[in-house]
């Protein structure tokens, strides 16, 4: 683990308080553990991205001349498993949540620091098992592991991969418990529930899903492994099992898992929008409560993934209605962000560009989700590229844009260094353009009937696939640029002040990077969240006194 700060730094902080690999591997500091997750998840993102590149290169031509069907199946399975279970699900909670949560509530650390470090090691063990399975033959089931193929048909490393996902699930559960206890028990004096930053509210709602939903997928995947090993009839109809039961259990977790990725992103966007529009969030309580509403409603809509699986018509109608209903709290947030921007003093820094990109892409992803909530339309679009485009607009266009926005917004706090703003803006624009060129043509491909997971296709689909692959190339460059300038900034970037954006929040009231125990004295909260008028007046008075 490289030391991020040079030894000439005068003030002691969490980066230079100790040196050496041992100090990192045995740390109980939530900030260092957040960085451990950052480096690990970046590696997983690169692996998942390379698999995506292989998929898009294969689909550049309609004849499947780059790899065979078996290799293609393993490639998109590897992409899905790595990106969903080992990057997107833990991304913002594990990296930004670990680093920021105690700072935002004025605490010295999380409630259970040793458990926090254990969570990272458990995540590593799960990732090692899954990657080991891919390197020793791979998996061809898709990330959904649908039965009975995954239990009886596939002869690939399903069991080892399933064990990797099962183990990593404990990391999410422990992180969720740690966050909930910390928010309940360790808030600074004066920090009432409705003074909490919205990022903290989003982590609170996400932790509920972690704790209630993750055991379901962990047990389901474990049952798949048990059926393969012991030939017991759980999902295999030949043994008296029910494959539809697997889909119910799988989607009971996997639909709320979408909100594990999106809720923290919404928290990030709320923070960035307020800061760079210098405005109090419009309808604070509605935005906060809508996070909990999304978390709870998210558990009631899994059946819309099964409209073509043979469930009853009445069940389909109920799940259709509930799927439309879950859009309401999401729409509340988009409306309130827009209202916050109205008459705001907007500054288009790189984090703000990512936040605005999130709103646009998430809105498109959400609206196309309404198509899939409608029974008749879903029958036409199921298992086509429309589905691929829709969930990438949510999980990549939404969650990943917010992750990058968060990384840029809090980078000065994390490292004590600034990055190149010009390069950051260029990369944010490239990501936005590249993403749309990659995935918007896939809506049309899906509407025209191109099925997902096929590595050969009719010639008439090639033009749109060429656009999509060209967009993926731009997107790849957009992701590569931040990797370079942020790595450079760690050691050579200009030093950052405690609050380079003039942002509200306790984390900006401590030095950059923060000291080991976060604050020199315990902060006392007396103001509402996002009181930018008061903050701007204080900053102006400070400037006048200097003059």
Image (cartoon, grey):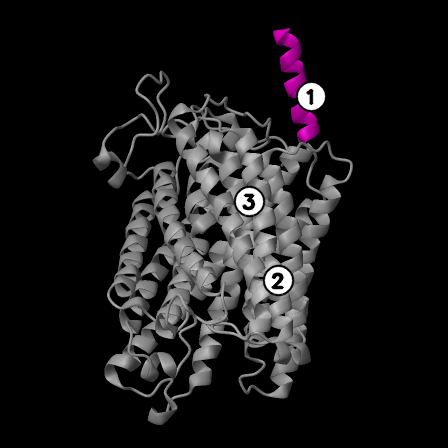
First reached walking from the N terminus: tag 1 or tag 2: 2
Q: Residues within 10 Å of mark 2 (few under 14, many from 20)?
A: many
C-alpha span from label 2 to label 3: 33 Å
Q: Quadrant of the C terminus?
A: top right
SS for dot 2: helix
Residue at position x 38%, y 48% in the image:
41
Q: Earlier in the sequence, mark 2 or mark 3?
A: 3
Sort mark 1 into few (<14), some (14-19) or many (20+) by Cα contacts within 10 Å: few
Left or right of 239, for residue 311: right
Disc tally is: 3
The residue located at (29%, 55%) in the rendering is 122
Magenta part of the chain? 532-547
Query: To which residue does mark 2 refer?
Result: 441
* Tag 1 and tag 2, C-beta contact below 8 Å: no
| Whole-percent x, y for residue 535 in the image | 65, 25
Q: Secondary structure at mark 1?
A: helix
Query: Residue 371: x percent and y percent?
Result: 67, 70
Q: Is residue 53 above or below residue 543?
A: below
Instruction: Say which element carries label 3.
Output: helix
Where residue 82 appears, as percent x and y from the top left, is 39, 59
The secondary structure making up most of the magenta span is helix
Q: Nearer the viewer, mark 1 or mark 2?
A: 2
- In this rendering, the answer to whether 120 lies above or below 453 is above
Asked whether the viewer can see residue 193, the reply is no
Residue 540 counted in the magenta span = yes
What residue did someone put label 1 on? 537
Within the image, what quadrant is residue 246 found in? bottom left
Q: Which residue is mark 3?
A: 199
């Amino acid at each position: 683990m490289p030391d991020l700060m040079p030894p000439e730094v005068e003030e002691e902080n969490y980066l230079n308080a100790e040196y050496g690999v041992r100090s990192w591997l045995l740390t109980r500091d939530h900030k260092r553990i957040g960085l451990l997750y950052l480096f690990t998840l970046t590696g997983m993102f690169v692996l998942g991205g390379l698999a995506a590149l292989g998929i898009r290169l294969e689909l550049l031509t309609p004849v499947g001349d780059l790899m065979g069907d078996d290799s293609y199946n393993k490639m998109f399975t590897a992409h899905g498993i790595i990106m969903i279970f080992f990057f997107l699900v833990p991304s913002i909670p594990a990296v930004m949540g670990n680093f920021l949560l105690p700072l935002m509530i004025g605490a010295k650390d999380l409630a259970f620091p040793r458990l926090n470090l254990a969570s990272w090691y458990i995540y590593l063990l799960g990732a090692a098992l899954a990657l080991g399975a891919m390197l020793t033959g791979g998996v061809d089931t898709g990330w959904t592991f649908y039965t009975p193929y995954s239990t009886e048909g596939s002869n690939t490393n399903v069991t080892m991969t399933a064990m990797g996902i099962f183990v990593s699930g404990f990391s999410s559960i422990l992180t969720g418990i740690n966050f909930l206890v910390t928010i309940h028990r360790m808030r600074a004096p004066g920090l009432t529930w409705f003074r909490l930053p919205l990022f903290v509210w989003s982590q609170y709602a996400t932790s509920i899903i972690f704790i209630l939903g993750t055991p379901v997928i962990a047990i389901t995947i474990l049952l798949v492994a048990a059926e393969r090993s012991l030939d017991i009839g759980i999902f295999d109809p030949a043994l008296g099992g029910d494959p539809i039961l697997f889909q119910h259990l799988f989607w009971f977790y996997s639909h709320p898992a979408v909100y594990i990725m999106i809720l923290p992103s919404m928290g990030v966007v709320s923070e960035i929008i307020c800061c760079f529009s210098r405005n109090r969030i419009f309808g604070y309580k509605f935005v906060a409560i809508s996070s909990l509403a999304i978390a709870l409603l998210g558990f009631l809509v899994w059946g819309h993934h099964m409209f073509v699986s043979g469930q009853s018509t009445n069940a389909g109608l109920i799940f259709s209605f509930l799927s439309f209903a879950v859009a309401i709290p999401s729409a509340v947030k988009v409306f309130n962000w827009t209202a916050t921007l109205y008459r705001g003093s907007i500054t288009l820094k790189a984090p703000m560009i990512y936040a605005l990109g999130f709103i646009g892409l998430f809105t498109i992803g959400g609206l196309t989700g309404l198509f899939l909530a409608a029974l008749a339309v879903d029958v036409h679009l199921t298992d086509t590229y429309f589905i691929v485009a829709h969930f990438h607009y949510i999980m990549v266009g939404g969650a990943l844009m917010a992750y990058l926005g968060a990384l840029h917004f809090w980078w000065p706090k994390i490292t004590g260094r600034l990055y190149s703003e010009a390069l950051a803006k260029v990369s944010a624009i490239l990501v936005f353009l590249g993403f749309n060129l990659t995935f918007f043509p896939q809506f049309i491909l899906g509407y025209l009937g191109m099925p997902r997971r096929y590595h050969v296709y009719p010639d008439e689909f090639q033009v749109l696939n060429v656009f999509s692959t060209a967009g993926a190339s731009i997107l790849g460059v957009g992701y590569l640029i931040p990797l370079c300038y942020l790595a450079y900034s760690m050691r050579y970037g200009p030093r950052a002040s405690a609050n380079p954006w003039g942002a509200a929040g306790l984390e900006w009231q401590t030095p950059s990077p923060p000291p080991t125990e976060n604050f020199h004295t315990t902060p006392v909260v007396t103001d509402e969240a996002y009181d930018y008028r008061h903050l701007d007046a204080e900053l102006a008075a400070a400037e006048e006194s200097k003059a």
